Amino acid sequence: METVVSIPIADPAMENKDIIAYKQELIKDVYCTNVVGTVKLGKVIVSILNVSEVTKEINESVMNRILYDTATSYNIHTVHAVINNDNRVNRILNLIRSDHMSIDERKSIFEICEQYSEIFHLEGDRLTFTNAAEHVINLNVNQQPIYQRPYRLPHSQQSEIKQQLDKMEQGGIIEPSSSPWNAPLLLVKKKLDASGKEKFRIVIDFRALNQVTLNEFHPLPNITEILDHLGQCQLFSVIDLASGFYQIPLSESSRELTAFSANNAHYHFRRMAMEMKTSPSTFQRLMDNVLSGIIGIKCLVYLDDIIIYAKN
C-alpha cells in the first residue's frame, strides 16, 4: 500500500528549492521511497510505502526525521528545435495501438501520455544521457593497441552507414578519432517491428577488445523468477528505453579503445555501446540503483526493459 503525504522542512532557506528524499525505512516494513520534490510553504510531498499486509501508524516525530539532500540540476540537453507541445502529444498518440482497450483505459493512457510527453523519445529528438553512471573499460596490464582492418561491405550499404554515422555524430554518441585502435563495422538488419518497415543498425565487432578487457560482474535478474513474480498480476506496462545503452556516457580514458573506421573516416564512442564486454553489468547496476526501493514492489527490470505490474 502506498500513500502520498506532506512532510515539514524546517529550514526556511529551502523554500522553493528542490530536494531529494532517499529510500529509508521509517518503521518496520514502512519506507519512504526515492522522491524528488519542491519545497512549498515549508513542506514537500513524499511517497510512503507499506510493504506488509497490516495497517501501520507512524508518529509525526518519525516523519520529521526523514533524511533529504538538496537536489542539483544539470543541463544535460540543449533543445535545438522547438516543437509545439500539442503537435508532440499528437505524434505520441498516433503511435499508440489502443484498439484492444476500453474507452476508460484509452482515456487514462492518453492523459498520461499528454502529461509526460517530454519523456517519450520521438524521431528527431536528441538522445540525452545520465549522470548517475559512467562506463569504464579496464584492460590487461601493458596492453598494446589492437588494429583490425575494416570489413569489406557492399556498396549498397554505404549510404545507410553514412546516414547512421552522421546521425550518431550529431547526437554526441560518436566523434572523430585519432586513436591507434580500430575495430571492424557491420550493418545488421533489425527484426521487423509493428510498423513492418525494414530497418538496420550499426554493429561494431569488439571481440578483440573484449578479449583483453578485464571482467566486471553484476548479477542479471533471473527471467524465470521474473515470470514467477508476475504470476498473479493482471495489468502490465512495459517500458523499453530508447537506445538505452547509448544513454550512459563512456569515460574519457576508455573512448580511444572503441575506435572504428567506415567510409574513409575514423571515429570512437562517447557513449557506452551494447557490444562492449562489460556493458550489461554497467547497465544493470545503473537500473538497480535508479529504481532501488520499487523493484519487486512496483516494477521489475532486466537491462533496458522495465515492466510495471499490478494485481488489479
Image (cartoon, grey):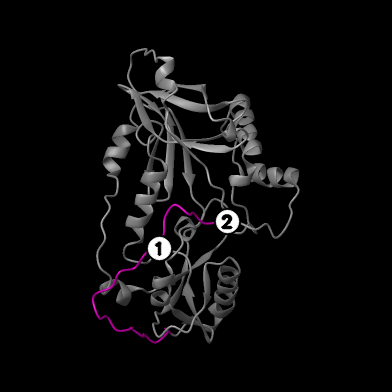
> Does the segment drawn in magenta span residue 131?
yes
Quadrant assignment, res 81: bottom right
Q: Can the viewer see residue 1?
A: no
Q: Position of residue 204 (x, y in %)?
A: 42, 73
* First along the sequence among labels 2 and 1: 2
The answer to whether 65 appears left or right of 11 in the picture is left
Residue positioned 38% across, 26% down in the render: 31
> Does the segment drawn in magenta span residue 260?
no
The 10 Å Cα crowd at callout 1, few under 14, some 14 to 19, many 20 or more, is some
Mark 1 sits on what residue? 274
Q: Between marks 2 and 1, how big is the CA–CA gap?
A: 22 Å
Q: Position of residue 282 (x, y in %)?
A: 35, 56
Q: Main secondary structure of the magenta part?
A: loop
Q: Secondary structure at mark 1?
A: loop
Of badges 2 and 1, the one in the foreground is 2
Q: Which residues are magenta?
A: 128-151
Q: Secondary structure at mark 2?
A: loop
